[in-house]
Image (cartoon, coloured by chain):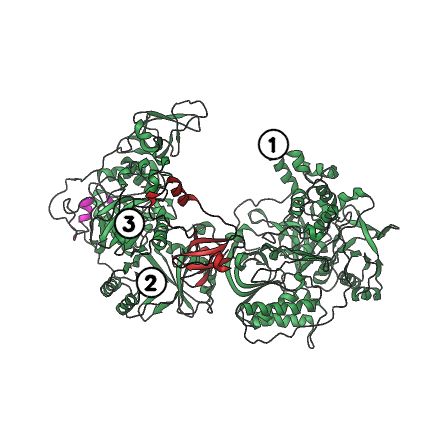
Chain colours: A red, B green
Amino acid sequence: MLLIRCPYCCEERSEEEFTCAGEGGIRRPASPDDLSDAQWADYLHFRTNPKGLHREIWCHTAGCRRYFDVVRDTVTYAIHSTTPIGATPATRETDD
Amino acid sequence: MTDVTRRLPEGGAIDRSRPLAFTFNGVTLTGYEGDTLASALLANGVDVVGRSFKYGRPRGIVGYGAEEPNAIVQVGEGSARTPNLRATRVELEDGMVATSAARGPGTAMGALARAFGRLLPAGFYYKTFIRPQGLWGFWEERLREAAGFGDVPDGADPDIYERRYGHADVLVVGAGPAGLAAALSASRAGARVFFADENSAFGGTLRWSSVATDSESAGEWCRHALAELADNPDVHLLNRATAFGLYDHNFVGILERCVGNAETPGKAPRQRLHQVRAKQVVLACGAIERPIVFAGNDLPGVMTASAVSGYTIHHAVAPGERLVLFTNNDSAYDTALTWHRIGREVTVVDVRPTADGAGPDAARAAGIDIRVGHVVQEAHGRRRVNGVQIAPVGGGKIERLDCDLVASSGGWNPLVHLSAQTGVRPQWSEVALAFLPGSPRDGVHHAGAINGHTSTSACMREGARVGNEAARLAGFDGPRDEPDLPDGDDGPCAPPEALFLVPHPRPSRESRQFVDMQLDVTVADIDLAAREGYRSVEHAKRYTALGFGTDQGKLGNVNGVAILARALGQGIDETGTTMFRPPYTPVTFGAVAGRDVGEFFDPARRTPMHEWHETHGAVWEDVGRWKRPRYYARGADERMDEAVRRECLAARGGVAMLDASTLGKIDVQGPDAAVFLDRVYSNGFRRLAVGRCRYGLMLREDGTILDDGVTVRVADNRYLLHTTTGNAEAVLSWLELWRQTEWPELNVHLTSVTDHWATAAVVGPKSRTVLRRVCTDIDLSPDAFRFMDYRAGHVAGVPARVYRISFSGELSFEVNVAAQHGPRVWEALIAAGDDFDITPYGTETMHVLRAEMGFIIVGQDTDGSMIPDDMGLAGLVRHGKPWGFLGDRSLSLPEHQRPDRPQLVGLTPLNPATVLPEGAQLVKEPRPKLPAKMQGHVTSSYLSAAMGHSFALAMVKGGRERIGETLYSPQADGSVIPAKVVPSVFLEPVVDANEGESQGAPQPLALAPLPAATAPAMLNLCGDGTHEFRRAASEALCLTLPGRPCTTARDTSIAIHWLAPDEWLIVAPPGEEAEIERRLREATSAPGAAITDVTGAYILLRLSGPQAREALASATPYDLHPRNFPPGRCVQTTLAKTQALIAAPNEDTFEVIVRRSYAHYAEAWLTDASS
């Protein structure tokens, strides 16, 4: 059971208040009609699934109902950072 | 069993004035208050407590605590039976009924095993029974029966269980010397301490240790320390509580056994599960003694040395007369001295060439016989040991010693289980001759014997230091009063000598050298695994089943690793150990479920008219979490088909009414509301006129249908969006995801108002006439109030929104009022329709009526892979909108262009009385050759009262081109139902009914005056978060909007709760919602503010008193301790299986605001939790 800091409520809360909405940092293509079927399928279906730091979107469902970025280690489950949408989450590079 | 009593005449922590009668395997025995089941069995001379798993060998009690592999029992009878308990951990209660889990030798398989025991090596079962493959299931059942894991309880568990959340700065696991010192240090630093120990008493070995301070003995110090901890309100002391799992981010599962409740099942909890979140965790779990493996070591009467001491000292039970004590270290000499003190004979067999520590010296001084440089090779006996064979190390004269008790000590295994659960692999230490925990994760600390320390004072010093450090890391680094620790010389400890297995001169004895007693794994098995190529310890474990029992190999694992290392010719460090998973000891499902059973298993959401339905014959259907009337039975005898027929005819021919309150409703406000809806719906919403409604289709990005529903344009910048009942939350999350992450530039706010509106759909040719009698300020005439119009006015004197929309194809008005007025308006409509026999109808009739029109239900007729065209809804797809819409691009993918995609069609069974089962598959021929090609399946199927025959909707491959074709549905019973493919629309909607009503003024219904509001007014306020907005809103409310997260601003009349950075909940005196809304709208005329009346959406519960905090602590994972949650705070969190906003107006009151539909559940749950 993870402990996740909500960047809006500004405190750590139990995982059961949250839902994970999948990989973060994926922007919807600006002009979908200009993409080939393969490019569109890539946006729709393909995700990175790394071993290590992973950028995710979570929602504080039972709390403030706001989405935010999480960088989580898929090996240790350590939460590396939680940041509001729009802010730049700490990535592997900036961490080093 | 013998007729001896092994109870000593004096001593022990038992109350001899309180004898307790109990039965074991049907025999009545007596113990005393303070006994465990194990000590009572030993006292009664019960040698054999069970039969072994594989060979059916008689087994006795070996250990003293959680490590016990043999004495696995069931306690209780019938449905109250608790399986899989260790007798060593069961506190004796009067009238207890206990049985061995594995009694044998009654089974054929057991007899086979005993006869051919030596022929059943590791892997035997798999090798023997796996072929032919189909038979493994048969054998598995027989083998499990023979293995004897006890009987499954035969009914629902009558016991009750509790689950609560705990919060701590420092959690200390284990209350021995190190844990006690750690808890004391941390609490003196000011930290909130949770202190758990699995024993019934705190203190562990400190209670009889020889260490002391200047003024106090260890026992006295221990009592004072515990008194100090008990007096501290910020220390939670918990005995009989096993920390069984250390999960991510210091989430710890602790199972508390509540004793004394056996006679009153269902009254007081039997067990309590604590889910504790700790900033820092100190593992002071201690160590358990490791036995030494020798031939015949599984005979009853062979125990660990510390178990012999434990029973003798604590329970005044001497488990034998003459003891042979076999050791490789000094600690066992304490047992020898204890045995000597009670006046019984003991011989110590010490593998070491010399024994000259303080313990051996004291033993020698007492005249105890010590044989250094010797080993016990074999224990003799049949149902109990009667002697041992000893020999000098390295060979020499074999000697037999008569005895009835053998105790061995091979050193100490630190309890690394919890540490290993965090993924930290234990490391072998040649110094400690043990696996020590690896470097702990952040926030976890190890102290005491878990680190391999053997001296009490060293453990205490380390405990105090670690407790201090944990408190400092938890934020308590101020000055504190350091505890004065007892000190003293535990005596110079001579080093132990590595010894795990005593080789026997005859190799055949390897099959009698037991490593894992619970699963009957022997040295021969491990050697075989090594010979067959299992070099990894994990593989060897799985091949031999070593450590797979419910005891997780607490006694056997390390010996098994050492024996495998020897067989592989490598070091123990190289071999490594297997890991441990939670739980440390078994946890009952009841404790995990807590009170979430029966009516609390899944919350039932109720509409405002629930009670009315209940008193009018509603038969319920679960739709999502909602309880909806499926139909209303008139009288006890009316069947569903009769009721549905009656309800359908009323709707088509007269007037009927449906409670549609469960539909999801989202209030969409903001200057960009139209743009937003245009993007999320496949059809257009920007040009929808104010006062009009439109049916819309929402797609996922892959083009499939997510949801559908009617959206109303209430004002220029305001829409009300409806979702399907089951999809309300998913749709809101979906919309918020896009609003917050992709389109933050859109100025639009979404507020869930599902619970705010009570909805009555008045349906049928007479609906207009009926509505006129209770609604006088809306012109309901066909020209003024057209199909898909929306009007605001009053119904039964209550502000109402009326939509002329129809899910039945009939003339229909959906009347929406704030939920608190729902029952009044519903009853007024029923009264107004009385002379037309207005008929309430349920979901079943609703389904029939809509299916006759060919209207789909998302989630019933669609299955998550359907695109609009599949459902014949291509007309609702508007390509070329300014931004496009979600899912647009995917509709042109080749997969979505296939001509043989499933398409919605109608079916009429050739036999008009036959109703096709929903989900039935369709094929081309009545008796097709198998495998037959599926043509589609039935999605909805009913008997139509209006048409007089059965009909169905189905998804059929290329179905729209196949009208007229006959398809066949083979049934499980061998029959075949033929049905003709027809268009999906069976009846044409009534465009506008001219119901032939009398012209002229209606006769308004006489109504009781509207009573004054009693529940607080509530408004949801969203803004853009700018200074101007907040100032304007604050001025209008005469109270500053709280800017700090999770706080409440309050004055004498209103409270404003922070919900999110741009969202607040205003709670005001009853009846003021309209006035506050007006003031806010005036003040915040700038675009960007969204004000929503949610008075009907929530119920405010007030809880006070000491029970309140405790009840909430079992309902919410949030920490409501005054330090974390002082007055002025508010929090939105989970409350049991729903959600709530909890606020603290003052020191001892909590306000709990829950959604109205969950109010009944939340109230009942909290009442149950506080009783």
| Labelled disc at residue B133 | 1
Circles 3 and 1: CB distance less than 8 Å? no
Q: Mark 2 Cα within 10 Å, few/some/many (few <14, many 20+)? A: many
Which residue position holds label 2?
B1064
Q: In which quarter of the image is residue B684?
A: top left
Which residue position holds label 3?
B677
Residue at mark 1: chain: B
Q: Which amino acid does label 1 sit on?
A: Gln
Who comes first in sequence, dot 3 or dot 1? 1
* Depth check, front residue: B467 or B644: B467
Residue B277 location, x and y as percent? Answer: 52, 61
Count how many numbered circles sit on residues in the image. 3
* Depth check, front residue: A43 or B875: A43
Residue farthest toward the right in the current orientation of the protein: B397
Region in magenta: B762-780
Whether residue B556 is visible here, answered yes or no, is no
Asked if the stretch drawn in magenta spans residue B777, the answer is yes
* Depth check, front residue: B1127 or B924: B924
Instruction: Name above or below for residue B1117 compared with residue B868.
Output: below
Which residue sits at x=80%, y=65%? B357
Residue B577 location, x and y as percent? Answer: 66, 51
